[in-house]
Amino acid sequence: MKVNLTIDGRQVAVDAQATVLEAAKTIGIEIPTFCYHPRLEVFGGCRMCLVEVEGWRKLETACTCKVSEGMIVHTDTPKVQAGRKAMLEFLLVNHPLDCPVCDRSGACDLQDLVFKYGSAETRFKGQKRVLPDRVVSPLIDRNVNRCIQCKRCVRACDEIQGVAALGMAHRGAKTVVVPFMDKTLDCEFCGHCIYVCPVGCVTPMPARHVARTWEMEKTPSVCSYCSNGCRLEYNSRDEKVLKVSHLEGPGVNNASLCSKGFFGYDAINHPDRITTPLIRKNGQLTESSWEEALETVAEKLGQFSGGQAGGIASPRMTNEDLYLFQKFFRTALKSNNVDTTSGNWARKVLPVLDERLGVFASPNSVGELSGAGAILIVGCDITVSAPITGLKIKEALRKGARVTEINPARSPLKRLGTRSLLVSPGQELAVVKGMIRVILDEELVDLSAVRSWEGFGDLEKTVREKDLDDIAGMTGVDREAIRQAARDFAGAPKASILFGEIAALQPGGEKLIHALLDLLFVTGKAGREGSGIHPVYSPANYQGAVDMGAGPSWLPGRVDKKALEKAWGTSLPEEAGLDALRMIQAASEGKLKALYLVGVDPFSSIPGSSEVQEALEKLEFLVVQDLFMTEAARNADVVLPAAGMAEREGTLTSSERRVQKISKAVRESGESRADWKIFTGLAAALKASGMDFSSPKDILGEISRVVPSYAGLGDVDLGNGGVQWPAPGTERLCGDGAPGGKERFGAVAEWSTMEKGSQYPLSLILGELLFHSGSLSRYSENLNKIVSSACLLLNPQTAAEFKIPDESTVRIYSANGSVKVQARHSEDLVPGVLFLPRHFENVRASDLMVPGPGTESMTAVVKVRVERIEE
Amino acid sequence: MSELKILTKRAGLPDSVKIDTYLANDGYKALTKALKEMTPAQVRDEVLKSKLRGRGGAGFATGMKWDFASKNTTKPKFIVCNADEGEPGTFKDRVILKFDPHALLEGMAIAAFAVDADHGYIYIRGEYPEEAQILMDAVKEAEERGYLGKNILGSDLSFTITVHRGAGAYVCGEETALIESLEGSRGQSRIRPPFPVNSGYRKLPTVVNNVESLSCVPHIVLNGGAWFAGIGNPECPGPKLFSISGAVEKPGVYELPMGVPLRELIETAGGMKDGKDFKAAFPGGASSACMDASEIDTGLDFNSLAAIGTMLGSGAVMILDETADMVKAAYVLTRFFDHESCGKCTPCREGLTWVKQVMAGILEGKGTEEDLDLLLDICEQIQGASFCGLGDASVNCVTSTIRKFRGEYLNYINKEPRVRAASGEKS
């Protein structure tokens, strides 16, 4: 129902629930505010938005005033002007005139509004209140005397992030925003408080007093840390990134960021950046020129063409980098041995989605989740793996959505009221089948559409093999909880499923995904807004790596060989390629002679450290292209310095298929070069054809002609939120229900996806922290101020069983090797499961990860045992 | 007019807080009558007929509030008694809390019946620990005897009361800030609308009534709304507990009809202390504009005081005599509001800091006549833009004393600290 009112003589019609402030905005009238923010609930405290309503004695705040039929509003009368002037004069009673020393000067709402509506002089001649200054955090600075008590920071921390780390203490003019219990700030460092502060009160500490706002160059770009693909703005001066600021507008994040995006920019500024190419001469890595380095690499790699050379790349590379990487190998070296460290996940997950949904990517969009009435999260801490997706879920929770998590640990979402079904990895399948059983038994949905599907009978049969009591016995999950989870999911008109690494990268992970798809189809929740399935995987450009064919078994766009040969005008190698794990195995057996690692340290990401060591030693030629001297780089024959984030251009494809432009904010550090440029340089040195590109835009042009889903993307602006492929922008890849010809159920017979081991009775999750990403972030001084080393987390019950006191030193043993770390107790983990972050130098993931058939590389869950060590 | 003994009838009795004393003196008869002989609509009707207006100070018609609450069918519903009694100069609710607690409990139970409420809270100011204990004991007694709890007196009404202590914030006497505090949050006012009757405690329908208002309810039920409406000023009738303090012989709480002239209240309280001349009065506590000697015959009720530009509020009458320093009085009251401002809105939080400093400057002899215009300007902006009633009312002491006792301000400004005579004549 629309309401008609008049603002400044102009007619406007809006929804009955709109406020005068919102109504004015629709016709381009900006009313000044401080405490109002479109993403926060109305506060009404600053009194800046005073307007005159005809017939009302006093001025009214536009942000709290709901519209009414026939209302006549004036936003610029002498009374309003006097009111605004007065509010600003009031704010300057206690707000110190710190502009000359305030980081916000030039970008400050109070400054701007005083210039616009205030008076040049104040009549206040008294004493300003002075609150004691205190450092509350090494990353977030609070200049308490500048606070104007708008409470935006407190509200944002509570209403957007759901953390509520800030509160207001004391009263009146002595009101001060303090961290919880007035201690050091203990929060998620997402930076929302900095984003919403209208003045120079809350500011980023690392950027304190480094430059004035107008001295810094602002470059809009996209974060390179995770696959959410958040838009942000690099602030730089003299070719150095000094800070990141929030960028509103289209895209997935609407200005929101996480600690990595907001504070992690300084990883590229670390002093240990490799600055020049290095060639091993007389056993020592010595500085050399690019010319010499490229020639050396080209010459050496050229000797090992035809399957004897292989390359493993990082999923942080751009689409252009990855496209050229695989093209270089396939055309110049005649080898299909190309892979990324995210390839394993892709090979496990995407074929299942392809088989059941006909899609080779996430079929839905992240933003839809905020409108879902029920969300099921399996094997994933979404707040860590994809923080912005986590924010959408928090939004949904606030609107009353029912969220169930089937996880080995309670996630921070528990604060907002989720149902946690805690299970060991491997037991999720039983719970999901139990949910399907409840839905069938209680007829929670109309099954008439799916009864005729192939496999429905098998599905019915298999889920009825066990009853809820059995499942409760197997998994330790309360049967009522399973029942309620099923009812919640089936009962919501919009329901979505998310599954993460822990679910996917188990030995039997595909079965779990099939079961989740069965749940989706049986309840009819596929392919509609707010309903669908989301594979969650955090490496920034894992989807781009798939699309660009940076894997042994897929060509770019998964086109067939003949089509690609035609497009490239060359023949392609026949022999099937090796994936990353098999390349290492082949190298350790002497069969692979040359290896090209781009942004990859196999000790961090390939199982079997001894095998990796052997491989590196046996290789005849190892070239490492990276930002920092990794362990692999120290073993290399040639080291090539690569450009990092903010130093490169190109596109990244986010988890929701959003292809976005990233822009160069600063020059490449030292003599480092963009990856794509190094590849073209090598191709030129090898006199290979088809690799002559002068810019990322050039490369994208070819990509858009070769990769069907990227058609048209070479001609459009990919800033401003980019395009969700296929063009012109596709929110959802598949429509209602199952795609034609795929009306069938998986009807998975198994009830568990992991074997129980007796020698290695515990499950270790080699996982991620919110504050770090892969191994890149360990070079960020900022992020290291939050956490900089790994410790093992285990449930007190498990700790008691294995006699491990809190904060003791332990050794973790897997079938491959062992690692020494400190252990801490955590009530949030299910007994029998351990958690160890894999980002830091003190833990070499390959020491623990176990190679071999059945357990693929980069497994997120490893079977281990743990022993206390006396120190 | 002579003092009444309706609300204060039982206060002087020995063991007046005990339920047996209460029962022996018409106690819980009204509740019984309401539950057994009346419908909720009939009870509400009597309260409407009584023309009872909120005794906490806002003066909203209680019957109308209950009607709104009864129309909202969302459950659960709550009755919240505002026993914060924070206004400087008011101490009348304390008489009921301390000496006749069951009257309040009975009133709340009847209110619950009238609007179909499920639970009651008494939000009592932190500075009344004794009274809080008395209330808790009384609730226990009432529950034991079946006047609170499940199916009271065999009826469908299940209702009991939780006593919740405040922590010393004046702003928590404002109903939405009170509700925030009751919920465990910071005591800051909420945006209205929605009003508590539709969205109050836990965003559910909540009736917030003052102690004295609720203690009137049993009498209204027993004797009828018309009887109540026949007491005192017919436009805003009823018995009223007046707190009178300051320069009178016998400060205290006196029960008189609504509309009693100020002069008479002073006489009832023993007349001016030591025979001094009357200079000024704040009839509704610190929040009210002052009255001068020319207004001493004004009736003390909502309408009559509003007509002369001040307010009854809770009836917290503070008397100042010829020796009183009006500038200092205004300063002391301003300091109170500055201290109690919750800090949510700019004009109250910053404006009162400013007003306080200007007033202090005047008292130190550093003021100028421009400062008086400045004060009036600041006060106008505070009153025009504040988020809640605290800010609105906080400036009355300054504006009214400047208006009526400008001479005393000028004395300070011209550095003549002599106090002028009661009539406020210029020097």
Image (cartoon, coloured by chain):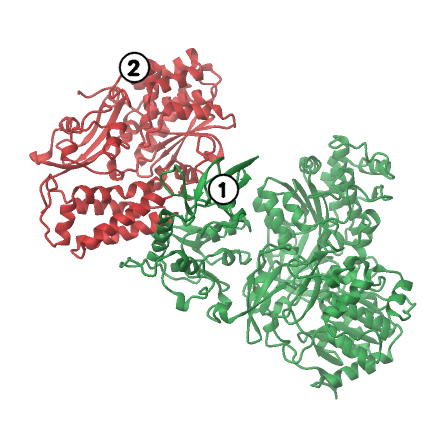
Q: Colour of chain B?
A: red
Front-lying residue, A76 or B74: A76
Name the residue tied to disc 2. Answer: B227
Circle on res. A19: 1
Q: Nearer the viewer, residue A276 or B309?
A: B309
Asked whether residue A762 is in view, the answer is no
Q: Dot 2: few (<14), some (14–19), or many (≥20) neighbours within 10 Å?
A: some
Q: Quadrant of the C terminus of chain A?
A: bottom right
Query: In terms of image quadrants, where is residue A776?
Result: bottom right
Mark 2 belongs to chain: B
Question: Which chain does tag 1 point to?
Answer: A
Amino acid at pointer 2: Trp
Q: Amino acid at mark 1?
A: Thr
Q: Which mark is residue B178?
A: none
Q: Residue A124: horizontal and vertical position, in percent?
A: 29, 57
Give the vertical position of A751 relative to A850 (above or below). Answer: above
